[in-house]
Amino acid sequence: MLRIFCVSLFVTLVSGCIRPPEIVLVDRATALEQQASGSFEELETKLQRNAATPRPIPLTPEQIEAIGIRQQPFVDQSELTDAGRVDLLLKQHCLGEAKDGTIRDTPDACRGAADRDLIATLVERVNLARLQLWRWLHERQPKRSVEELRRAWHA
């Protein structure tokens, strides 16, 4: 038993003394490159100084709309009538007026973000209202055709 104790004590002492050697690597290519290329300390500090100062980038309203950020209207959207919504969408070029007097969706020319479902229901509702108006005008002036009334409306 004493023998096992001595062997285990020796193994413990020897294993505590074992440690990996310290290895230091030197990158000689970097030092050689620095000598060959020269020192750009002034340029480096200038670049770091410019990169460290955040500042806003001036954007035009057209660039902001191209990014997809909508400018907030001065009027609350919930208080707008259909005519007010149509006017806003006409200004954004999301809607256009056809030659027959109705309004059409123009998604290719639209500047800024717009809700396509809202535009579709608005176009349908406004065109229906315009057709009803032309019929009513035709009833009031039966001598004029519906086409004449549409052209007069468009003009």
Image (spheres, rainbow, N blue to C red):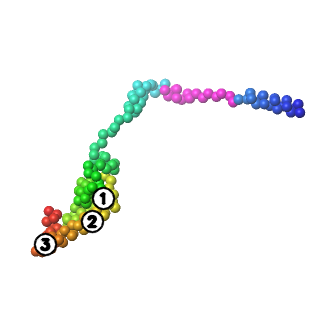
Q: First in sequence, mark 3 or 1: give its number.
A: 1
Amino acid type shown at disc 2 = Arg
Q: Is residue 109 visible?
A: no
Residues at marks 2 and 3, CA–CA distance in whole angstroms: 23 Å
Density class for disc 3 (Cα within 10 Å; few <14, some 14-19, many ≥20) is few
Q: Position of residue 146 (x, y in %)?
A: 16, 72
Q: Is residue 78 visible?
A: yes
**Which of 66/21 is in front?**
66
- Decide: is 97 above or below 50: below
Quarter of the image for residue 52 reads top left
Which residue carries the number 2 mark?
Answer: 125
Which residue carries the number 1 mark?
Answer: 107
Magenta segment includes 28: yes
Which residue carries the number 3 mark?
Answer: 140
For mark 3, give the secondary structure: helix
Which residue sits at x=28%, y=62%? 122
Residues at marks 3 and 1, CA–CA distance in whole angstroms: 37 Å
The boundaries of the magenta stretch are 20-34
Magenta segment includes 114: no
Amino acid type shown at disc 3 = Arg
Position of 137 with respect to 14 (left or right) is left
- Decide: is 2 above or below 68: above
Residues at marks 1 and 2, CA–CA distance in whole angstroms: 18 Å
> Which image quarter holds the C terminus?
bottom left
Position of 68 with respect to 30 (left or right) is left
Amino acid type shown at disc 1 = Pro
Q: Are marks 3 and 1 in contact (CB under 8 Å)?
A: no
Q: Position of residue 144 (x, y in %)?
A: 12, 72
Quarter of the image for residue 134 reads bottom left
Position of 92 with respect to 146 (left or right) is right
Which residue sits at x=40%, y=33%? 51
For mark 2, give the secondary structure: helix
